[in-house]
Image (cartoon, rainbow, N blue to C red):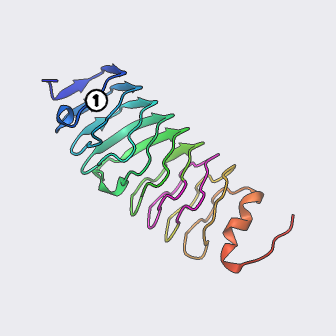
Amino acid sequence: MNNRVFFDQTFEQTTFQKTDLLDFEFEQCQFINCSFPDGDLSNVRFIECDFDQIDLSNSRLFKTSFQNCSFNTCKLIGLYFEQCEMFGLNFKAQNCIFDHSSFHKVRLPGFQAQNCSFKNVDFTEAILKKANFEGSDFTYAIFERTELEKADLSSTSNLSLDPEVNPIKQAKIDLEALPGLLTKFSLNIKQ
């Protein structure tokens, strides 16, 4: 790839090597069933891009920019989103796997992530006001000083957080999820 800026292009079943992506910018591009075997997306800018069936697991995201991007049925396992370029960070996800990733101190108000897996994910001090996590799995996810005001946590599973240290005012939560908000009290709740 000689060109460093790509606009409105579709990449399907393409393999990107680390040297292929150094300081590249992709705007309004689609990535379908592509692979990134070297796992280094440092300094790459993705603006209004769509990712479908992509595996970015364990990729390096140092100063990577995701602005108004969408992920559908992607594997985003073991990623440190706090290393991304924070200016303009905004993406949505559906049916994706974020297991073992970290959103430590990441600001993603209005984050849309429906039917995703967030097993063992660190959300410490993340700002997720008005986020929509409908239908997602939070097995062993860490919430410490995480801002979740007006977040949609309906139909989620395995949610466990302390409302005294995690602002959740006006959040939508199903009745079945209430025991996860009382975990610290070691109550034996019967249904």
- Picture quadrant of residue 106: bottom left
Where residue 179 sits: x, y (%)?
73, 67
Q: Is residue 45 left or right of residue 104?
A: left
Q: Residues within 10 Å of mark 1 (few under 14, many from 20)?
A: some
- In magenta, the rendered stretch is 119-142
Q: Amino acid at mark 1?
A: Glu
Residue extending furthest toward the bottom? 185
Residue extending furthest toward the right? 191
Nearer to the camera, 187 or 37: 37
Residue sitting at x 41%, y 31%: 51
Q: Is residue 160 left or right of residue 80?
A: right
Where residue 105 sits: x, y (%)?
39, 63
Q: Quick check: is 135 in the magenta stretch?
A: yes
Q: Quadrant of the C terminus?
A: bottom right
Q: Quick check: is 26 in the magenta stretch?
A: no
What kind of element bears circle 1?
A: strand
Q: Is residue 10 left or right of residue 109?
A: left
Where residue 36 sits: x, y (%)?
32, 35
Q: Quadrant of the N terminus?
A: top left
Residue sitting at x 47%, y 36%: 74
Residue sitting at x 50%, y 64%: 147
Residue at label 1? 27
Residue extending furthest toward the left? 2
How many numbered marks are there?
1
Of helix, strand and loop, which mostly describes the magenta segment? loop
